[in-house]
Amino acid sequence: MPDYRALFDLSGRIALVVGAASGIGRASAEALAGLGAHVVCADRSLEGAEATAGAIRVAGSAEAIACDAADAGSVRALAAAISERHGRLDAALTTPGLNIRKRVLDYSEEEFERVVRLNLKGTFLFFRAFGGLMRTQGSGSLIACSSIRASTIEPGLAVYGMTKAGIATLVKGFAAEMGPVGVRVNAIAPGIIETALTTPIKEHPEIWRTYAAHTVFNRWGAASEVAAAVAFLAADASSYISGATLMVDGGWTAVDGPPTGLTGTRPN
């Protein structure tokens, strides 16, 4: 029988989290470190990345590096630093994203380009830089961040949703290219998650409750619940999973609108 505990063990592995300063990125860095990995915490805010790394170092192993996920030179420099310092990279996650919530007719070209540059081009830059490292070593797990908005939309989210759907498709295509060299490529698709960025919504209880009601649990998710999915995709436990987008959405995309709460047998 396989050692199932060992399949989740990341001891001795080198993991990267881009966007580690806060939210899902920070929680994922903590989860990967909690399973034994040495985590490279990267973020545009070096101070934020160092805060995450410092918290991890209380009981784990981590370092901090500045990186702008939308800048090709910055991403290449990060890849070079990891290669020089560690000689390998076993798992890598990118989380930075931008949503300018506007209807399509109200979008400026500059706003459109900002969202596409970070969300979609940033994921491409991440795959190109760190996929190259993993191809050389013949192993590794790359994880991108899509969203439930890749498949379910509301007014004002068309451009953001387009980029997240593009990420899911990019994951499939890149997985097909990287599979023969032993590298897995997947994405997570979070739903409504409590982070510093979503805290202002609590000032509007009706909106908060409406979103919660779309899930089968009638609640928002925690960043740690998304981080657990990231850790699974980074570990050998998911060794036969590639090209997939893992929904971490409390059932939002599994049901047709908010659950009614009705139980029992209905009459014919």
Image (cartoon, rainbow, N blue to C red):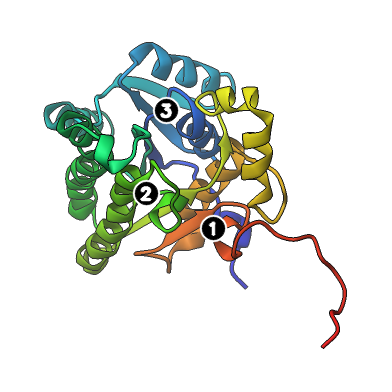
Q: Position of residue 128 (x, y in %)?
A: 17, 46
Say which quadrant the N terminus sits in: bottom right
In the rendered image, the residue lying farthest to the top is: 47
- Dot 3 crowding, Cα within 10 Å, few <14, some 14–19, many 20+: many
> Is label 3 in a helix, a strand or a loop?
loop
**For the point 58% across and 28% down, which residue is it?**
201
- Dot 2 crowding, Cα within 10 Å, few <14, some 14–19, many 20+: many
Amino acid type, mark 1? Leu
Would you say the residues marked 2 and 3 are in contact, meaning their CB atoms lie under 8 Å apart?
no
Q: Position of residue 235 (x, y in %)?
A: 48, 53
Say which quadrant the C terminus sits in: bottom right
Inter-mark Cα distance, 1 to 3: 24 Å
| Circle number at residue 7 | 1
Point out the tag, 2 or 3, that comes first from the N-terminus: 3
In the shown orientation, is residue 62 left or right of residue 72? Answer: right
> Would you name the residue on which mark 3 appears?
20
In the shown orientation, is residue 93 left or right of residue 121? Answer: right
